[in-house]
């Protein structure tokens, strides 16, 4: 676990212990692998800035994959068929179990950071985009962001060749469901906020990056 306490002025902090950090992924083979806790993650939060703007009709980019007896992958962009203008999906290895369809003009732009959160509401993962809940569709099957093996940030899965191309920051997972107001507050506070100061309750995994290229290994 890499983190720093929030100081009155963090403008000079740019290293691995800074909430200003991010990982740059090359889209070819860069991943960050975090040791897993054998639990169902109820909430997931991340900031992303892809190299190329991702839309509902562009190629999909994997944000992270979770491994247990099966695996689940969080994607942004058009993934699979049979959906309508999906911008965010969760794929469990055989089915798209959760998606944000009819996303309109929303995108993950290449010139600014976008906040994405997924929160378990008792029947599905509710998708939040820049602090706001979106219409979330589920196929009815239970999908769990569970891992007793590893969490791979920036890769579509252990046997897949899809990798994220761009920057990722502030990866956080809780074993409790955040409230809508908490998700909104995390977005409003911005990427540079250290979540340990106000949102450490049930925070299980928190990845802070140095401002350098991402590589394989625990961050």
Image (tube, helix red, strand yellow):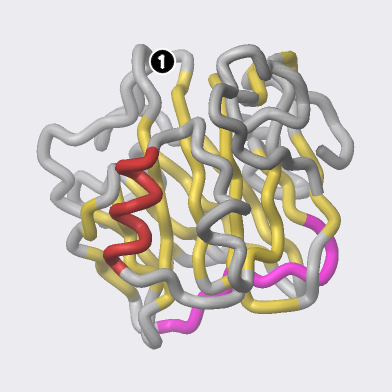
Position above or below: 200 against 17 = below
Q: Main secondary structure of the magenta part?
A: loop
Is any part of residue 165 visible from this angle? no
Q: Residue furthest right?
A: 217
Position above or below: 4 against 172 = above
Is any part of residue 137 visible from this angle? yes
Percent of width and height locating residue 82? 27, 56
Q: Is residue 192 magenta?
A: no
Percent of width and height locating residue 177? 46, 75
Nearer to me, 8 or 100: 8
Q: Is residue 147 magenta?
A: yes
User: Horizontally, is 1 left or right of 208 in the view?
Assistant: right
Which segment did they paint magenta?
A: 141-150
**Dot 1 lies on which element?**
loop
- On the rendered image, what quadrant is the C terminus found in? top right
Q: Residue at label 1?
A: 52
* Residue at 56% in and 50% down: 195
* Residue at 37% in and 85% down: 123
Displayed quadrant of residue 20: top right
* Residue at 74% in and 68% down: 147
Nearer to me, 90 or 84: 90
Nearer to me, 32 or 10: 10
Percent of width and height locating residue 131? 28, 50
* Residue at 70% in and 65% down: 204
Nearer to me, 140 or 210: 210
Position above or below: 104 against 71 = above
């Amino acid at each position: 676990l890499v983190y720093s306490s929030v100081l009155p002025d963090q403008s000079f902090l740019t290293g691995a212990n800074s909430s200003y950090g991010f990982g740059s992924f090359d889209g070819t083979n860069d991943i960050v692998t975090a040791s897993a806790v054998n639990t169902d993650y109820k909430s997931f939060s991340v900031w992303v800035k892809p190299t190329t703007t991702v839309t509902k009709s562009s190629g999909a980019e994997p944000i992270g994959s979770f491994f247990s007896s099966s695996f689940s992958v969080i994607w942004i962009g058009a993934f699979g068929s049979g959906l309508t203008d999906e911008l965010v999906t969760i794929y469990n290895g055989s089915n798209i179990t959760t998606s944000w369809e009819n996303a309109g003009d929303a995108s993950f732009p290449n010139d600014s950071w976008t906040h994405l959160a997924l929160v378990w509401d008792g029947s599905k993962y509710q998708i939040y985009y820049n602090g706001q809940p979106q219409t979330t569709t589920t196929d009815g099957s239970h999908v769990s962001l569970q891992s007793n093996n590893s969490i791979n940030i920036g890769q579509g899965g252990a046997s897949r060749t899809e990798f994220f191309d761009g920057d990722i920051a502030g990866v956080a997972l809780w074993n409790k469901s955040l409230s809508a107001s908490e998700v909104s507050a995390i977005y409003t506070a911005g990427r540079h906020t250290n979540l340990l100061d106000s949102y450490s309750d049930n925070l299980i995994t928190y990845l802070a990056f140095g401002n350098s290229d991402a590589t394989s290994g625990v961050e």
